[in-house]
Amino acid sequence: MSAVKDPDQVAALVRCFLDSEVAKKQKKLTESFEKIAEANLPWSKPQTSDLSDTKEERLEHASKIQAKIAKNKAYATKKGKFRLTAVHVATIFILPIDDLRKGGWLSHEAHPETLLHMRLQLMSNLVKHYLTKAQEALTIADRPPETDQSTADESATQSMKRSHPERELRSRKRNSSATSPYLEEETSESEAGPSQASKPTKADNDPDYKPKPHVRSEAEKKKCRERDLWRCLFQRTGSGQVCHILPFTWNNTEQAVQDTKAIQDAFVPFFDDSTRLKLADLLMDVTTLGETDKVWNMLYLNPQLRSYWGQARIGLFCKAIGPYEPDKSRVQTDVEDDWVDVIIQFNWLNRREGKPNDEMADKDAMNAMAEMQIQHENEGSPSGQNKYGADIDAMRVDTRTSVLSGHEVRIAMPPKDAALCKLMLDLQWAIIRIAAMSGAAGYPELLPVHRDWNKVKAIWSLYASLD
């Protein structure tokens, strides 16, 4: 990284450039400097882990967890005795520190080696589920949407008239209905109505009834585009895609729901009981397939940024749900009186280019991973480069400025929707940091398959053969 020049040096460089013949002949260049100088974007300190303070303790826990599991030869590999892998170590670095201490969810003092190993594998399964389901959502997005203009949601046609460039949201007054890769490509600019309900239409005691797979709602996608003003939330470009925060393929079919049920215990370290029950309602109820295919689980993003998100090069953190902040450029009837703001912070992540199943042979290897993360955070979580040395970056077109870690956007929505949006962001934030730190985002196929997924797959293959 090149040395940062002091303000006087920067000012001198700018004056020199503005006096040049190029600047005089290319007025757009001067205009760009003006936009940069006038930009006053919402920003707060990027998110940091507690690794600087807890590194030594976490390394000690990691060593003891590894030693305890290694005593059981059932977990030995062809290379020898059990060793923690990169995704295991990333999990230990990301989990709340209390979950590693005595009595915690991954405490080496409280649990036998069998449970420790199972839970480490379960967190790996969670990351795999997130990444592979996101890729599956992309595949589905390539298919033409099933449309039914006769059932179009008229409320979704309300246009949003908003011109203030610093606010990232606001939708027209309307009733609210109520996922590597990612998220879904736009497949059609035509606005179809909502997909048909996936709830059972036969009696609940009918053992042969299987709910129909959920088809993506074009009406919900349109609500997202209109709410976000048909422009990327962060880059402000006009060309973009509606992206799910959490892949809707977690619960678009009954088989997907069964796969999601298998990894629900991995939510325990990150959420309290009531929140986990809410996640179960949203993601694991076969009578409401596609429950997360709603505008509160969608963002409008530039294709480049969407790609970075899917590669775990960026993560979105929900700062808070705050009061709606009106501005002078907007008529107050555009939103309901009780609407609130979901405040989302952009963060560039430190993505490891290695493989998630790389063995961390000793404490030195684990320490190197921790130090890389600490350095990234100390530098303000900058954008980086890929393994070929190409820059990973994004620009905000209306201000000619880079999209920096800490940049905030606000999205207005009803309080109930805001709580659900925050829940989706919180789950994404927990998973995507492990995916980035471990290198899993680049090699999801190397993560372990949950022992129940093959059973689910076999059962559904049998069902398919009988149809």
Image (cartoon, rainbow, N blue to C red):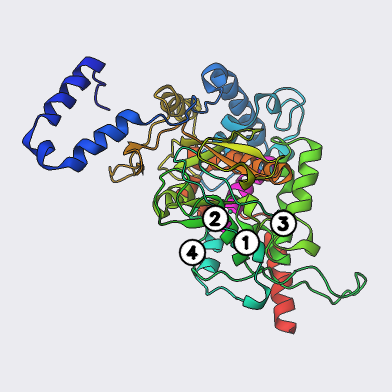
Q: Earlier in the sequence, mark 2 or mark 3?
A: 3
Q: Nearer the viewer, residue 358 or 135?
A: 135
Residue 39 in picture, x, y percent from top left: 37, 31
Q: Which residue is mark 4?
A: 186
Disc with the residue nearer the chain's start (2 vs 4): 4
Point out which mark residue 177 bears.
3
Q: Residue furthest left?
A: 21
Instruction: Tell me the element at label 4.
Output: loop
Q: Three-letter amino acid code at disc 1?
A: Ala
- Which one is in front in this view, the residue at disc 4 or the one at disc 3? 3
Question: Magenta stretch containing residue 121, yes or no?
Answer: yes
- Residue 34 to residue 52: above or below: below
Left or right position of 105 against 183:
right
Residue at image mark 1: 156
Q: Secondary structure at mark 1?
A: helix
Q: Are marks 1 and 2 in contact (CB under 8 Å)?
A: yes
Residue bearing the label numbered 2: 226
Secondary structure, magenta segment, majority class: helix
Image quarter of residue 8: top left
Disc 1 and disc 2: Cα gap in Å?
A: 8 Å
Q: CA distance from mark 3 to mark 1?
A: 10 Å
Q: Position of residue 278 (x, y in %)?
A: 78, 46
